[in-house]
Amino acid sequence: MSIVQPELHEQTLRFSRLIQGVWRMAEWQQTPQETLSFIHQCLELGITSFDHADLYGDYTCEAIFGAALKADPFLRSQLQLISKCGIKLVSQNRPQHKIKHYDTSREHILASVDHSLQALHTDYLDVLLIHRPDPLMDADEVAAAFTQLKQAGKVLHFGVSNFSPSQFNLLASRLPFALVTHQIEISVMHLAAFADGTLDQCQQLRIAPMAWSPLGGGELFSGSSPQAVRLRSALTTIAQLHHATVDQVALAWLLAHPAKILPILGTGNLDRIRAAAAAATIYLTREEWFLIWTASTGTEVP
Ligand SMILES: NC(=O)c1ccc[n+]([C@@H]2O[C@H](COP(=O)([O-])OP(=O)(O)OC[C@H]3O[C@@H](n4cnc5c(N)ncnc54)[C@H](OP(=O)(O)O)[C@@H]3O)[C@@H](O)[C@H]2O)c1
Protein backbone atom coordinates (compact mmCIF):
# COMPACT_ATOMS: atom_id res chain seq x y z
CA MET A 1 0.00 0.00 0.00
CA SER A 2 1.37 3.41 -0.90
CA ILE A 3 2.43 5.84 1.77
CA VAL A 4 1.18 9.41 1.80
CA GLN A 5 3.90 11.90 2.47
CA PRO A 6 2.52 15.34 3.22
CA GLU A 7 4.46 17.59 0.91
CA LEU A 8 5.08 20.58 3.12
CA HIS A 9 6.27 18.79 6.23
CA GLU A 10 9.38 17.18 7.52
CA GLN A 11 10.42 13.90 5.94
CA THR A 12 9.85 12.21 9.28
CA LEU A 13 6.06 12.32 8.93
CA ARG A 14 4.40 9.35 7.24
CA PHE A 15 0.87 8.00 7.38
CA SER A 16 -0.28 4.77 5.77
CA ARG A 17 -2.94 5.22 3.08
CA LEU A 18 -5.47 3.63 5.46
CA ILE A 19 -5.36 4.30 9.18
CA GLN A 20 -6.60 1.83 11.78
CA GLY A 21 -8.90 3.43 14.37
CA VAL A 22 -9.11 2.00 17.86
CA TRP A 23 -12.17 3.82 19.20
CA ARG A 24 -14.05 0.51 19.40
CA MET A 25 -11.07 -1.59 20.55
CA ALA A 26 -12.39 -2.22 24.07
CA GLU A 27 -15.51 -3.80 22.48
CA TRP A 28 -13.38 -6.27 20.51
CA GLN A 29 -12.61 -8.14 23.73
CA GLN A 30 -9.18 -9.21 22.52
CA THR A 31 -6.69 -10.95 24.77
CA PRO A 32 -3.31 -9.15 24.98
CA GLN A 33 -1.90 -11.79 22.59
CA GLU A 34 -4.76 -11.14 20.15
CA THR A 35 -4.13 -7.38 20.28
CA LEU A 36 -0.47 -7.98 19.50
CA SER A 37 -1.36 -10.28 16.63
CA PHE A 38 -3.95 -7.76 15.38
CA ILE A 39 -1.35 -4.98 15.23
CA HIS A 40 1.12 -7.24 13.42
CA GLN A 41 -1.49 -8.22 10.84
CA CYS A 42 -2.38 -4.57 10.22
CA LEU A 43 1.31 -3.85 9.63
CA GLU A 44 1.52 -6.77 7.18
CA LEU A 45 -1.36 -5.17 5.27
CA GLY A 46 0.56 -1.90 5.07
CA ILE A 47 -1.59 -0.21 7.73
CA THR A 48 1.02 1.38 9.97
CA SER A 49 -0.86 4.39 11.40
CA PHE A 50 -3.15 3.93 14.43
CA ASP A 51 -5.69 6.49 15.60
CA HIS A 52 -6.23 6.83 19.35
CA ALA A 53 -7.74 9.34 21.75
CA ASP A 54 -7.24 9.61 25.48
CA LEU A 55 -10.93 8.86 26.08
CA TYR A 56 -11.49 5.88 23.73
CA GLY A 57 -13.05 2.91 25.51
CA ASP A 58 -13.83 5.12 28.50
CA TYR A 59 -10.11 5.93 28.82
CA THR A 60 -8.98 2.29 28.42
CA CYS A 61 -8.01 1.76 24.74
CA GLU A 62 -4.56 3.36 24.91
CA ALA A 63 -3.62 0.99 27.74
CA ILE A 64 -4.93 -2.06 25.84
CA PHE A 65 -2.80 -1.09 22.83
CA GLY A 66 0.10 -0.07 25.06
CA ALA A 67 0.26 -3.53 26.62
CA ALA A 68 1.04 -4.89 23.13
CA LEU A 69 3.74 -2.28 22.60
CA LYS A 70 5.26 -3.23 25.93
CA ALA A 71 5.22 -6.93 25.00
CA ASP A 72 6.99 -6.24 21.67
CA PRO A 73 9.33 -3.25 21.99
CA PHE A 74 10.35 -3.54 18.31
CA LEU A 75 6.82 -2.59 17.24
CA ARG A 76 7.00 1.08 18.15
CA SER A 77 9.43 2.10 15.41
CA GLN A 78 7.26 0.37 12.78
CA LEU A 79 4.08 2.34 13.41
CA GLN A 80 2.73 5.85 13.82
CA LEU A 81 0.61 6.74 16.85
CA ILE A 82 -1.96 9.49 16.60
CA SER A 83 -3.79 10.51 19.76
CA LYS A 84 -6.13 13.29 20.83
CA CYS A 85 -7.01 15.31 23.87
CA GLY A 86 -9.35 18.12 24.89
CA ILE A 87 -12.62 16.33 25.76
CA LYS A 88 -13.33 15.52 29.39
CA LEU A 89 -15.86 12.72 29.79
CA VAL A 90 -17.79 11.91 32.91
CA SER A 91 -16.31 8.51 33.72
CA GLN A 92 -15.56 6.31 36.65
CA ASN A 93 -12.02 6.36 35.29
CA ARG A 94 -11.92 10.15 35.68
CA PRO A 95 -13.97 10.79 38.86
CA GLN A 96 -12.79 14.40 38.99
CA HIS A 97 -14.88 15.26 35.84
CA LYS A 98 -18.29 16.52 36.95
CA ILE A 99 -19.83 17.34 33.56
CA LYS A 100 -18.77 16.50 30.03
CA HIS A 101 -16.81 19.48 28.72
CA TYR A 102 -13.86 20.61 26.65
CA ASP A 103 -10.50 21.65 28.06
CA THR A 104 -7.72 22.99 25.84
CA SER A 105 -5.80 24.62 28.67
CA ARG A 106 -2.04 24.16 28.63
CA GLU A 107 -2.23 22.28 31.89
CA HIS A 108 -4.75 19.76 30.56
CA ILE A 109 -2.99 19.22 27.22
CA LEU A 110 0.34 18.50 28.95
CA ALA A 111 -1.25 16.20 31.54
CA SER A 112 -3.28 14.34 28.90
CA VAL A 113 -0.20 13.68 26.75
CA ASP A 114 1.76 12.40 29.75
CA HIS A 115 -1.11 10.06 30.49
CA SER A 116 -1.29 8.86 26.86
CA LEU A 117 2.46 8.21 26.75
CA GLN A 118 2.30 6.23 29.95
CA ALA A 119 -0.71 4.17 28.82
CA LEU A 120 0.77 3.50 25.38
CA HIS A 121 4.20 2.55 26.77
CA THR A 122 5.95 4.95 24.47
CA ASP A 123 8.00 8.10 24.93
CA TYR A 124 6.53 9.97 21.94
CA LEU A 125 3.35 10.43 19.92
CA ASP A 126 3.76 10.93 16.18
CA VAL A 127 0.75 13.26 16.09
CA LEU A 128 -1.43 14.92 18.71
CA LEU A 129 -4.83 16.35 17.74
CA ILE A 130 -7.15 18.67 19.60
CA HIS A 131 -10.26 16.47 19.50
CA ARG A 132 -13.00 19.11 19.19
CA PRO A 133 -13.07 22.89 18.91
CA ASP A 134 -13.32 24.39 22.40
CA PRO A 135 -15.32 27.65 22.66
CA LEU A 136 -12.85 28.71 25.36
CA MET A 137 -9.76 27.82 23.31
CA ASP A 138 -6.95 30.33 23.78
CA ALA A 139 -4.83 29.77 20.67
CA ASP A 140 -1.72 31.27 22.32
CA GLU A 141 -2.05 28.86 25.21
CA VAL A 142 -2.50 25.82 22.94
CA ALA A 143 0.49 26.97 20.88
CA ALA A 144 2.60 27.23 24.03
CA ALA A 145 1.60 23.70 25.08
CA PHE A 146 2.30 22.28 21.60
CA THR A 147 5.69 24.01 21.48
CA GLN A 148 6.62 22.68 24.91
CA LEU A 149 5.62 19.13 23.90
CA LYS A 150 7.59 19.34 20.66
CA GLN A 151 10.67 20.70 22.39
CA ALA A 152 10.47 17.89 24.96
CA GLY A 153 10.26 15.33 22.13
CA LYS A 154 6.97 14.03 23.52
CA VAL A 155 4.98 14.85 20.36
CA LEU A 156 6.50 15.13 16.88
CA HIS A 157 3.57 16.73 14.98
CA PHE A 158 0.22 18.37 15.70
CA GLY A 159 -3.20 18.65 14.11
CA VAL A 160 -6.85 19.24 14.91
CA SER A 161 -10.15 17.43 14.57
CA ASN A 162 -13.65 18.70 13.80
CA PHE A 163 -12.51 22.34 13.50
CA SER A 164 -13.98 24.86 11.10
CA PRO A 165 -11.48 26.32 8.61
CA SER A 166 -11.42 29.58 10.60
CA GLN A 167 -10.76 27.75 13.87
CA PHE A 168 -7.95 25.88 12.09
CA ASN A 169 -6.52 29.19 10.80
CA LEU A 170 -6.68 30.77 14.25
CA LEU A 171 -4.60 28.04 15.86
CA ALA A 172 -2.23 27.78 12.89
CA SER A 173 -1.59 31.54 13.08
CA ARG A 174 -0.08 31.19 16.57
CA LEU A 175 2.16 28.18 15.91
CA PRO A 176 5.82 28.33 14.86
CA PHE A 177 5.30 25.10 12.84
CA ALA A 178 2.55 23.81 10.54
CA LEU A 179 -0.44 21.71 11.58
CA VAL A 180 -0.10 18.43 9.69
CA THR A 181 -3.63 17.10 9.45
CA HIS A 182 -7.30 17.78 10.06
CA GLN A 183 -9.39 14.79 11.15
CA ILE A 184 -13.00 15.17 10.08
CA GLU A 185 -16.14 13.16 9.40
CA ILE A 186 -16.30 12.34 5.69
CA SER A 187 -17.92 9.43 3.90
CA VAL A 188 -20.44 8.72 1.19
CA MET A 189 -23.01 9.46 3.90
CA HIS A 190 -21.47 12.71 5.18
CA LEU A 191 -20.61 15.25 2.50
CA ALA A 192 -20.41 18.44 4.60
CA ALA A 193 -16.61 18.72 4.34
CA PHE A 194 -16.92 19.11 0.56
CA ALA A 195 -18.98 22.27 0.94
CA ASP A 196 -17.86 23.94 4.17
CA GLY A 197 -14.32 24.77 3.03
CA THR A 198 -12.57 22.06 5.06
CA LEU A 199 -11.39 19.96 2.11
CA ASP A 200 -10.53 23.12 0.16
CA GLN A 201 -8.31 24.24 3.02
CA CYS A 202 -6.58 20.85 3.22
CA GLN A 203 -5.81 20.96 -0.49
CA GLN A 204 -4.66 24.56 -0.25
CA LEU A 205 -2.25 23.71 2.58
CA ARG A 206 -1.36 20.30 1.08
CA ILE A 207 -2.23 18.46 4.27
CA ALA A 208 -3.90 15.06 4.05
CA PRO A 209 -7.25 15.06 5.90
CA MET A 210 -8.16 11.99 7.96
CA ALA A 211 -11.72 10.68 7.47
CA TRP A 212 -13.43 9.39 10.58
CA SER A 213 -16.40 7.00 10.27
CA PRO A 214 -15.51 6.42 6.58
CA LEU A 215 -18.32 3.85 6.37
CA GLY A 216 -20.81 6.05 8.19
CA GLY A 217 -20.06 4.29 11.47
CA GLY A 218 -21.76 1.16 10.06
CA GLU A 219 -24.93 3.03 9.00
CA LEU A 220 -24.05 2.33 5.40
CA PHE A 221 -24.77 -1.36 5.99
CA SER A 222 -27.54 -1.23 8.58
CA GLY A 223 -29.24 2.14 8.07
CA SER A 224 -32.84 2.31 6.85
CA SER A 225 -32.86 6.00 5.86
CA PRO A 226 -33.65 6.72 2.19
CA GLN A 227 -30.02 7.92 1.80
CA ALA A 228 -28.58 4.65 3.15
CA VAL A 229 -30.92 2.60 0.95
CA ARG A 230 -30.02 4.59 -2.19
CA LEU A 231 -26.31 4.36 -1.38
CA ARG A 232 -26.36 0.60 -0.81
CA SER A 233 -28.06 0.16 -4.17
CA ALA A 234 -25.61 2.40 -6.07
CA LEU A 235 -22.55 0.96 -4.32
CA THR A 236 -23.70 -2.61 -4.96
CA THR A 237 -24.09 -1.90 -8.69
CA ILE A 238 -20.64 -0.36 -8.94
CA ALA A 239 -19.08 -3.04 -6.73
CA GLN A 240 -20.32 -5.73 -9.10
CA LEU A 241 -18.64 -3.99 -12.04
CA HIS A 242 -15.33 -3.90 -10.14
CA HIS A 243 -15.66 -7.42 -8.65
CA ALA A 244 -15.53 -5.65 -5.30
CA THR A 245 -17.70 -5.13 -2.22
CA VAL A 246 -19.79 -2.20 -0.97
CA ASP A 247 -17.27 -1.21 1.71
CA GLN A 248 -14.39 -1.32 -0.77
CA VAL A 249 -16.20 0.99 -3.21
CA ALA A 250 -17.15 3.41 -0.40
CA LEU A 251 -13.47 3.59 0.61
CA ALA A 252 -12.27 3.85 -3.01
CA TRP A 253 -14.64 6.83 -3.38
CA LEU A 254 -12.80 8.62 -0.54
CA LEU A 255 -9.36 7.57 -1.77
CA ALA A 256 -10.15 9.02 -5.22
CA HIS A 257 -10.32 12.57 -3.87
CA PRO A 258 -7.37 14.83 -4.75
CA ALA A 259 -7.00 15.98 -1.11
CA LYS A 260 -5.51 12.49 -0.46
CA ILE A 261 -8.09 11.64 2.19
CA LEU A 262 -6.85 9.04 4.69
CA PRO A 263 -9.79 6.85 5.79
CA ILE A 264 -9.67 5.67 9.41
CA LEU A 265 -11.05 2.13 9.61
CA GLY A 266 -13.30 1.39 12.58
CA THR A 267 -13.71 -2.38 12.35
CA GLY A 268 -11.65 -4.86 14.35
CA ASN A 269 -12.59 -7.65 11.93
CA LEU A 270 -9.42 -8.64 10.06
CA ASP A 271 -11.30 -9.97 7.03
CA ARG A 272 -12.93 -6.54 6.67
CA ILE A 273 -9.59 -4.80 7.19
CA ARG A 274 -8.03 -7.05 4.52
CA ALA A 275 -10.84 -6.14 2.12
CA ALA A 276 -10.38 -2.46 2.95
CA ALA A 277 -6.67 -2.63 2.20
CA ALA A 278 -7.51 -3.89 -1.29
CA ALA A 279 -9.74 -0.84 -1.88
CA ALA A 280 -6.62 1.13 -2.75
CA THR A 281 -6.44 -0.79 -6.04
CA ILE A 282 -10.00 0.12 -7.12
CA TYR A 283 -10.17 3.12 -9.43
CA LEU A 284 -13.59 4.66 -9.97
CA THR A 285 -14.46 6.54 -13.11
CA ARG A 286 -15.69 10.12 -12.70
CA GLU A 287 -19.19 8.95 -13.68
CA GLU A 288 -19.13 6.24 -11.01
CA TRP A 289 -17.92 8.77 -8.43
CA PHE A 290 -20.83 11.08 -9.27
CA LEU A 291 -23.33 8.22 -9.32
CA ILE A 292 -22.41 7.68 -5.66
CA TRP A 293 -22.56 11.43 -4.92
CA THR A 294 -26.02 11.60 -6.50
CA ALA A 295 -27.20 8.55 -4.53
CA SER A 296 -26.03 10.29 -1.36
CA THR A 297 -27.69 13.66 -2.01
CA GLY A 298 -30.77 12.15 -3.68
CA THR A 299 -30.63 14.64 -6.53
CA GLU A 300 -28.53 15.20 -9.63
CA VAL A 301 -25.88 17.90 -9.46
CA PRO A 302 -27.20 21.35 -10.51
N1 LIG B 1 -12.05 12.62 15.57
C1 LIG B 1 -13.26 12.24 15.90
O1 LIG B 1 -14.09 13.02 16.41
C2 LIG B 1 -13.66 10.81 15.65
C3 LIG B 1 -15.01 10.42 15.81
C4 LIG B 1 -15.34 9.09 15.56
C5 LIG B 1 -14.37 8.19 15.15
N2 LIG B 1 -13.05 8.59 15.03
C6 LIG B 1 -12.00 7.65 14.57
O2 LIG B 1 -12.46 7.04 13.38
C7 LIG B 1 -12.36 5.62 13.51
C8 LIG B 1 -13.39 4.97 12.64
O3 LIG B 1 -14.71 5.35 13.04
P1 LIG B 1 -15.90 4.31 12.92
O4 LIG B 1 -15.63 3.14 13.79
O5 LIG B 1 -17.17 5.03 13.09
O6 LIG B 1 -15.68 3.85 11.38
P2 LIG B 1 -16.56 3.08 10.32
O7 LIG B 1 -15.61 2.16 9.61
O8 LIG B 1 -17.33 4.05 9.51
O9 LIG B 1 -17.61 2.23 11.16
C9 LIG B 1 -17.26 1.07 11.84
C10 LIG B 1 -18.54 0.29 12.07
O10 LIG B 1 -18.98 -0.21 10.80
C11 LIG B 1 -19.07 -1.61 10.86
N3 LIG B 1 -18.56 -2.16 9.60
C12 LIG B 1 -17.35 -1.91 9.03
N4 LIG B 1 -17.22 -2.60 7.89
C13 LIG B 1 -18.35 -3.30 7.73
C14 LIG B 1 -18.83 -4.20 6.73
N5 LIG B 1 -18.10 -4.51 5.67
N6 LIG B 1 -20.07 -4.72 6.89
C15 LIG B 1 -20.83 -4.41 7.97
N7 LIG B 1 -20.43 -3.57 8.96
C16 LIG B 1 -19.21 -3.02 8.84
C17 LIG B 1 -18.20 -2.05 12.00
O11 LIG B 1 -18.67 -3.28 12.53
P3 LIG B 1 -17.62 -4.42 12.97
O12 LIG B 1 -16.77 -3.80 14.05
O13 LIG B 1 -18.54 -5.52 13.46
O14 LIG B 1 -16.84 -4.82 11.77
C18 LIG B 1 -18.34 -0.91 12.99
O15 LIG B 1 -19.52 -1.06 13.77
C19 LIG B 1 -12.49 5.38 15.01
O16 LIG B 1 -11.93 4.13 15.43
C20 LIG B 1 -11.71 6.54 15.56
O17 LIG B 1 -10.32 6.23 15.53
C21 LIG B 1 -12.70 9.89 15.27
Image: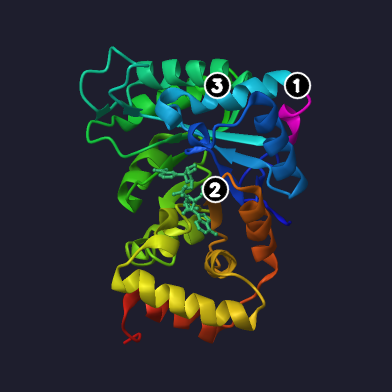
Sequence-earlier tag: 3 or 1 = 3
| Main SS of residues in magenta | helix
Q: List x then y, in percent, for residue 244.
A: 64, 72
Q: Secondary structure at mark 2?
A: loop
Q: Quadrant of residue 29?
A: top right
Q: Secondary structure at mark 3?
A: helix
The image shows residue 234 at horizontal and vertical percentages of 47, 80
* Residue behind mark 2: 267
Q: Which mark is residue 63?
A: 3
Q: Cβ of disc 2 within 8 Å of ligand 1?
A: yes
Q: Nearer the viewer, mark 1 or mark 2?
A: 2
Please identify, in this view, whether the residue under mark 3 or under mark 1 is nearer the observer.
3
| Residue shown at the point (52%, 67%) measured from the top left | 250
Residues packed near mark 1 inside 10 Å, few (<14), some (14 to 19) or many (20 plus): few
* Callout 3 amino acid: Ala
Viewer-proximal residue, 122 or 176?
122
Q: CA distance from mark 2 to mark 3?
A: 19 Å
Residue 185's image quarter? Answer: bottom left
User: Which quadrant is the N terminus positioned in?
Assistant: bottom right
The amino acid pointed to by label 2 is: Thr
**Residue drawn at point x = 37 percent, y = 16 percent:** 93
Q: Magenta region: which residues? A: 74-78
Q: Relative to the observer, which residue lies in front, 205 or 87?
A: 87
Residue 150 visible, this orientation: no
Disc with the residue nearer the chain's start (1 vs 2)? 1
Nearer the observer, 160 or 174: 160
